[in-house]
Amino acid sequence: VNVRFCGLELAHPIVNASGTFDALAAARAFGAQLRERFPFAAFVSKTITLRPRAGNPPPRLWETPAGLINSIGLPNRGLDGYIEHDLPALAALLDGLQPWVIEDRRMGDLGVGGAPLHPPPPPRPFVPLITNVMGSTAAEIATLLERCQQRPEIAAVELNVSCPNVNTGLDIGADPAQLEAVVREVRPRLTKPLIVKLTPNTADVAACAQAAQDGGADAVSLINTLRAMALAPADPAGGPRRPWLGGGSGGLSGPAIRAVALAQVQAVARRVSIPIVGMGGVQSGAHARDLLDVGATLVAVGTESFRDPAAGARIAWELAEL
Amino acid sequence: VSDAGGSHDAGRPDDARARQTARHAAGPDDAPGRPAAGEADRVQAPFARRVLPVMANEPLGAYRVLRLADPGAPAPEPGQFAMLAAFEHWGAGEDERPYLPRAFSIARVRRGEAHYLIEDVGPGSRRLCELAPGDSVWSLGPLGRGFAPPRERRRAILAGGGAGVAPLAILQDALLVNAPHDLPARGDPPGGPAWPPGEAPTVLLGFRDAARARGATLLDDAQIATDDGSVGHHGRVTDLLARELERDAHATVYACGPAAMLEAVRALCAARAVPAQLALEAGMACGFGACFGCVVPTRDGYARVCVDGPVLDAAQLERVA
């Protein structure tokens, strides 16, 4: 069941989508059980930016038919805060972990804790840390990559390119030519694997994946959330309807986008030769299997972890049993 | 996540004597049972959703009291909550919702059953209101940080509004467990730090109307206010609170309810330098700090209601929005 991905040896193909699982907060909520039963084969951090960000004003969430729009706004401590505070804590949490695969999705029937490990624990280190970063210029991204390069706790870097270019206002990742130029410029700063997290909000995602590969990416991951919005209830006093989300618009995730993800992953797999981390609405081993069958090497679980924090382990087990 | 689709929404059996012994054994007066440095700052949840059988789901005025058998769970602290979703038919309802689980304060634990007070305000709570014995519920919890015992021998005043009375019931149980008082606690002893012996708390509860005021029966000896004057004081629960603080301000106020009520409680207490602990509501997707969706502004920036709260010290807040 072990999977090789960009030189990393993983216990199974299920990881988390960036920004959908905060391992440090989960350790506060669940304590030692999180270490005993870590649900992912590699852990992807939320997006780190050069400077700290508070995130968007609430409300930040809106439930849709079979999905969720979020407008979180990438809150984080900034690169210095991440390196000084979060990284040591994350490394301590992930050190020596064995990813856990639960025996049965109906945990309540089994009682908590009786589930055997599957597969047998591999040798340390078991859960590599992938740090996700975002910058609005090539220079910013280069700084982020340099600092990640220096830290041995970080196994690989995922570059979030769903960020507006400060000059053009267009997402860096939405334009193949711009994406290739940025990746090519920053690539020399990192000898570790570089994964480019593509945006689905573009005319031709396969062309963007090709651009990332040509620029020197070791892998691509997709799909990020689809741009979406919701309106607040009408004001009884009249006037124009306002957006519900404090950030105006947000990104749609969950089962509502699963079919879109499958089509985009297939389109990318037909175009590039580098490995793919596929994600979008995965709730079961069968959904993960679909993404693997169209060409993904790993599958990330995102919104499903909100409903079930151990979803990653359950999906890995279901996948192994298919 | 917001169940209204618009606005925010949101033990073990033992005999009393054995409980008393256990509580006293946990530590002496001041901050008994407080975790030492490096230990957990809360009762932690098992890292798995549990499938729990519905034991009862009975109407209580405008609400329902949902009781789930959960004998193996850690005893929750007053103020902690759980994420609930029906085991079957969660989704594909009206507008293809609900999708995410919903957060509910644990109202009480009695004989190994967790009680929740549910008001039908959207597709998630509506589905939970439909459940009957024989059905099952996914439950994740207990989650979040609960209420802390009063300091400086202050008396406890509980101020609740609407469905926000729920966590005050288990809080009253905690306060009564060691109180030299005739009133017996109605629930199992809560988890977390032991609560020091003290007098029985003053309970002030506000509701919109008589049907909702039935929720007050979850607690004992409550003074009631209703917006329409159908039960008790005609006005706001904060009118009752102002009167109580006028009488004796050496108190800690524990409050849960709509944001506007909590803001009024915060302002009242701040003006009189009375410490207050506020249990906040916010639309949530996960309940354990993963989604960053449930933030509220505090003096130190945004706090996540699910992991930093739901109980926050009123002094942390500029205002409750």
Image: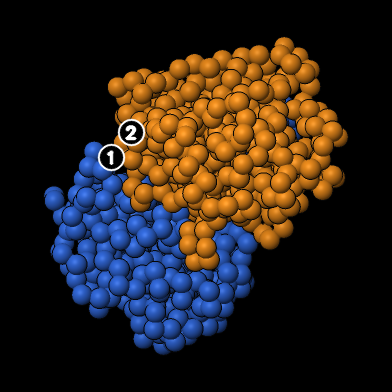
- Give the amino acid type for the residue marked by disc 1 in the picture: Gly
Residue B52 circle label: 2
Secondary structure at numbered mark 1? helix
User: Label 2 marks which chain's residue?
Assistant: B
- Residue, x 43% and y 31% (percent of image)? B15
Which residue appears farthest toward the top when viewing the image? B230
Query: Could you say which chain is coloured blue in the image?
Result: A
Label number found at residue A108: 1
User: Horizontal and vertical percent for residue B298?
Assistant: 69, 54
Give chain B's shade: orange
Q: Amino acid at mark 2?
A: Leu
Tell me how many marks there are. 2
- Identify the residue at image location x=57%, y=62%: A75
Task: Count neighbours of disc 1 (C-alpha within 10 A) and say few if under 14, some if 14 to 19, many if 20 or more.
Answer: some
Q: Position of residue B300 (x, y in %)?
A: 68, 61
Q: Is residue A237 left or right of residue A76?
A: right
| Between B59 and A169, the one nearer to me in the picture | B59
- Which residue does the image show at 30% across and 58% down from the upper left? A37
How far from the left and from the top, in percent, is residue B188? 46, 34
Q: Residues within 10 Å of mark 2 (few under 14, many from 20)?
A: many
